[in-house]
Amino acid sequence: MTYQPRFYWNEDTLQAFRLESNYLSTQELLNEVEKFVENCCSLEDGETEEDLVQDLLNLIYSKND
């Protein structure tokens, strides 16, 4: 079963993080994603930064391009 994202992510963002995931540890990538969400994303009603981080990480590690 492929992961169904909850949020829209720019394809360039996904590709950049997927590339980084080849060179960073899981913890380092998590830190980078958290910084990105904190600095570059806008929350809407009922969303949390953790929601966005988890969704983005799921997409980075999924194989559904």
Image: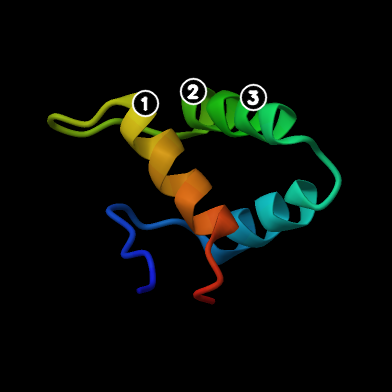
The x, y position of residue 20, in whole percent, is: 77, 48
Where does the N terminus fall, quadrant-wise?
bottom left
Seen in the picture, residue 21 relative to 3 is either above or below; the reply is: above
Q: Nearer the viewer, residue 38 or 32?
A: 32
For label 3, the SS is helix
- Residue projecting furthest to the right: 23
Q: Amino acid at mark 1?
A: Glu
**Residue drawn at point x = 77 percent, y = 56 percent:** 19
The x, y position of residue 50, in whole percent, is: 37, 27
Picture quadrant where residue 36 is located: top right
Please report whichever mark, 1 or 3, sits nearer to the chain's N-terminal start.
3
Q: Are marks 1 and 2 in contact (CB under 8 Å)?
A: yes
* C-alpha separation, residue under disc 1 versus residue under disc 2: 7 Å
Q: Are marks 1 and 3 in contact (CB under 8 Å)?
A: no
* C-alpha separation, residue under disc 2 versus residue under disc 3: 11 Å
CA neighbours of label 2 inside 10 A, class few (<14), some (14 to 19), many (20+): some
Q: Nearer the viewer, mark 2 or mark 3?
A: 3
**Residue drawn at point x = 68 percent, y = 27 percent:** 27
CA neighbours of label 3 inside 10 A, class few (<14), some (14 to 19), many (20+): few
Horizontal relation, residue 31 to residue 57: left or right: right
Residue that badge 3 annotates = 31
Q: Amino acid at mark 2?
A: Glu
Q: Amino acid at mark 3?
A: Asn
Where does the C terminus fall, quadrant-wise?
bottom right
Q: Nearer the viewer, mark 1 or mark 2?
A: 1
CA neighbours of label 1 inside 10 A, class few (<14), some (14 to 19), many (20+): some
Residue that badge 2 annotates = 38
The x, y position of residue 56, in whole percent, is: 47, 47
The x, y position of residue 8, in whole percent, is: 36, 57
Please report whichever mark, 2 or 3, sits nearer to the chain's N-terminal start.
3
Residue that badge 1 annotates = 49
**Residue drawn at point x = 13 percent, y = 31 percent:** 45
